[in-house]
Amino acid sequence: MQMLEGAIILTSFGSADDKIRENIFDKLAAEIFAAFPNFELRQAFTSLFMIKKLAARGISIATPAEEISKLRTEGFKRILLLPTHLTPGEEFDKKIKPCAAPDVEIISPLFSAECSTPFDKKIFATILDCFKKSADEDLILIGHGSPHRHNPVYENLQRLAGEKIHIGVIEESDTPNFSDVLKRLKFSRADKILLAPLLINGGVHVAEDIAGEKNSWLTRLVAFGYKVRVIKTGLGEFENFRELYLEKLKNFPAQNPD
């Protein structure tokens, strides 16, 4: 029997939606396992709320720290923690980075903080390929943002975006928020808009904050007179986007100087 090189923990914020877990996290886990057969593959969630919600339904999933403890007990000496988080924000800093140890290597989120590397540009090009806009549309990509500390990634992404592509965040206390994007739309003289989630999975944020029937980005943009088309699919449902995580793993640690 061939000895395993180590273990990979695919770590996500989490979702209680069975279809999202199946179409995104489980598919990505299967693709990683196929590409790295010499590694044990596990999944973990950072959201205790999601973990408890699933536990009430009899579905067990561990936190990264709990999964690391299990793997150590099983004798694994090298553990790679791969987050599905798009940006190095508060969730990554508080719940993933503290797991670092001599036997635990943390792979950084997809985007670097500066969004200036060739890989950052490839990620952004892949996103645009997933969310294709027509020539007469402006594209708005909406990320999560942070209510507790500013995440500069979204503003740095705007520099990659160009005039007809706008980056926004759901959290009004973070930037670029709805008001910031509205100013850009007026400057670009937009009429038609394609609205899409800058999120690995859509879930509640898409259903309520982005495309909901009350006080969402969709309803507010329509109220300002824009013609809006919405894509509700999270990025993780696109195979070409999931392939970026495989590339991240293959190039580790070259793209992870931190």
Image: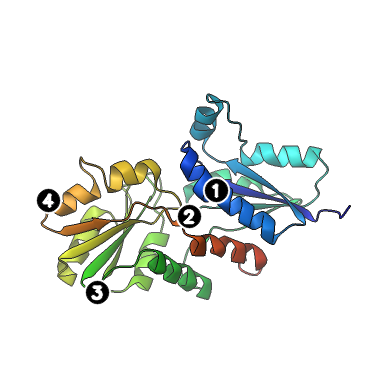
SS category of the residue bearing label 3: loop
Mark 4 crowdedness (10 Å alpha carbons): few <14, some 14-19, many ≥20: few
Q: Which residue is mark 4?
A: 223
Checking the image for residue 189, the label placed there is none
Q: Which residue is mark 2?
A: 236
The relative height of residue 76 versus residue 70 in the rendered view (above or below) is: below
**Distance Cα–Cα, label 4 vs label 2:** 30 Å
Question: Which dot, 4 or 2, sits closer to the camera?
Answer: 2
Q: Which residue is mark 1?
A: 25
Q: Nearer the viewer, residue 142 or 27?
A: 27
Query: Disc 3 vs disc 1: Cβ atoms closer than 8 Å?
Result: no
Quarter holding residue 159: bottom left
SS category of the residue bearing label 2: helix
Reading the chain from its start, which is encountered first: label 4 or label 1?
1
Across and down, in percent, residue 75 comes to 83, 43
Across and down, in percent, residue 65 comes to 66, 39
In what quadrant of the picture does the C terminus appear? bottom right
- Residue 111 visible, this orientation: no
Query: Disc 2 vs disc 1: Cβ atoms closer than 8 Å?
Result: yes
**Distance Cα–Cα, label 3 vs label 1:** 33 Å
